Structure formats: structure tokens, C-alpha cells
Amino acid sequence: MEMKNSSSSTSEFILLGISSNLQLQKPLFVIFLAMYLVTVAGNVLIVLVIYSDSRLHTPMYFFLSSLSFMDICLTTVIVPKMLVNLLSETKSISYVGCLVQMYFFMAFVNTDSYLLASMAIDRLVAICNPFRYDVVMNPRRCLLMLLGSCAISHLHSLFRVLLMSRLSFCASHVIKHFFCDTQPVLKLSCSDTSSNQVVIMTETLAVIMTPFPCILFSYLRIIIAVLKINSAAGKWKAFSTCGSHLTVVILFYGSAIYVYFRPLSMYSVAKDRVSTVMYTVVTPMLNPFIYSLRNKDMKRGLRKLRDRIHS
């Protein structure tokens, strides 16, 4: 692929990174390396615990293990390159590499979104229709939900990257971000991006935000069902099964909506970098802690895995 320049063609971008302050590069490297290692270790542990404990072979934990795997993939697409650039003087990424990073980032983050919706549906069925839970959330349907999530997300990413590949880039090739995200790359284009912005916003609403109303509807139904329970203990038990999932949804969608659902003219480098770090690095790192510390089944699974390793 070629990228046109006002004077000559070029084959790479420069990623500005988290901060241009040279004194902060090494401290930031240490911080994000530690966060990446914790993210990978924590999510691998979640997958291992669920895989090793037969009592956790249920739809909820199937989706949780899938979410943990996607979080590992998501951070791996972004963080290693960011760490290399923090210690590098050039901070470059090839044009093709930029598009590839953009593709997989969007694919994994969108799959995360659909998995969060699948987990909300699982809780809805478990609380509102418990007697048909095994029939509705059968293994075949759960697998189809996972495969559908991946297929839709990858088609969305392919469409978005094909749109981006048609743009021309002129004088500046410095991306004011720590990875190749849509908004900062669009800001560099000397092509007319108005049609791209309309298509991207419309398509993003259709594809990315489809799971969000599903989550809202599920929790509205859950709240109505729980309020009908007479005992306070019963209400608390029902709500407690949703607490971890709801916490992750708020962290994920709060920052994602702030970044992507604004006009390009309102794009802010500093604020958007902080928000993007939240759902690309911080949330995947926190997920294992949120789910394991608030969940008795996961705690039991962790103890079982520990005993098996030590025996």
C-alpha cells in the first residue's frame, strides 16, 4: 500500500506516545510493563482456573474466560509496541503495521463489547427465567454467540481499515497517540474525511453500540425482577451476581463512549489518551481482580488450582 505525501511517498508514521517528555519515558516504560505483565498473568490465571475446575464450566464462566482471552489479545496488540517506542528515539510504525494494529485493536475491542452483552443476557436468563436457563443458554448457543461476536467484529474492522487505506496523507505523519487509532490518524489526512466520518460514525453506532442497548435492556429487566423479590437477602443475592459485570461495563463503555462518540473537531490529544488508556490497558488489567475478588466460585477455583500446583 502507498501513502501519498505532498512532496514524496512515505511508508511509516511516527507515534508520539503517552508523553513527549523525555524524562518520563523510562518511568512510563516501567509502569506500563508492570501493568501489561499483571494483565497477562491475571487473565491467563482466570482462563486456567475456569478450564481446570469442572464446576466453572457454565455459560457465565465460558464468556468470562473468552473475555479474558480477548483482553490478553487487546493489550498485546497495543502495549508491546508502546513499550518499544518508549525506549526508542524514532518511535516509528510502518503504514501497513499501523493498519494491521488498527484492524486487530478494533476487532478485539468490539469482541469485548459483544461478550459483555452476552454476559448480560446470561445474567438476565439466570435471574428472570432460571428454570429454562440450561435450555436457553445451552453450550451450542453460547458457542454461536461467541463466534458471532468474533465474526461481526472482524468484518467491522475490515470495513473500517479499508476506508482508512483510501485516505491520502500530506505533510505531517506524526500520530499524537500511543497507537494507531481512528481519530488521530484521520486528523493527519489531507483528503476530505467528511464522508469517512459520517460512515464511520453511522457504522460505529450500528456495530459497536448494538451491545450497549442490549446490556441496558437486560439490566432493566433484572432490576424489575429483583425488586419483586420479597426478602432483602434474596435481592442482595440476585444483585451480587451482576456486580462484577456491571463494574466492568461502566469502566469499558464510559471511556469508549467519551473517545468515539464526538465529532473529529472535538478531538483532544491529552484527554483522549487518558480515556483510551482506561479501556485498553487499565480495564483489562482490573478485570481479573474485579471478577475473582467479588466471586466465591472464582476464589474456590483459585484455591483448587493452587492446591493442585503445590501437590
Image (cartoon, rainbow, N blue to C red):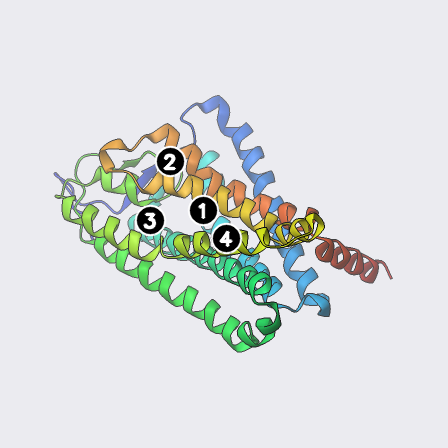
Quote the CA–CA distance across marks 4 and 1. 32 Å
Q: Secondary structure at mark 3?
A: helix
Q: Quadrant of residue 85?
A: top left
**Is any atom of residue 88 visible in this view?**
no
The amino acid pointed to by label 4 is Tyr
Residue ID for mark 4 = 219
- Ranked by sequence position, the earlier of labels 4 and 2 is 2
Residue ID for mark 1 = 78
Answer with left or right where residue 237 lies relative to residue 170. Answer: right
> Closer to the observer: label 2 or label 3?
3
Q: Residue at x 15, y 48 (%)?
A: 195
Residue 221, image x and y in percent?
49, 56
Labelled disc at residue 90? 2
Q: Residues within 10 Å of mark 1 (few under 14, many from 20)?
A: many
Q: Residues within 10 Å of mark 4 (few under 14, many from 20)?
A: some
> Closer to the observer: label 1 or label 2?
1
Q: Residue at x 56, y 75 (%)?
A: 138
The amino acid pointed to by label 1 is Ile
- The answer to whether the residue labelled 4 contacts the one labelled 3, judged by CB atoms less than 8 Å apart, is no
Q: Nearer the viewer, residue 46 or 78?
A: 46
Residue ID for mark 3 = 98
The amino acid pointed to by label 3 is Cys
> Closer to the observer: label 4 or label 3?
4
Q: Secondary structure at mark 1?
A: helix
- Ranked by sequence position, the earlier of labels 1 and 2 is 1
Residue 50, image x and y in percent?
67, 63
Q: Secondary structure at mark 4?
A: helix
Answer with left or right where residue 309 lies relative to residue 195. Answer: right
Quote the CA–CA distance across marks 2 and 3. 15 Å
Quote the CA–CA distance across marks 4 and 2. 48 Å
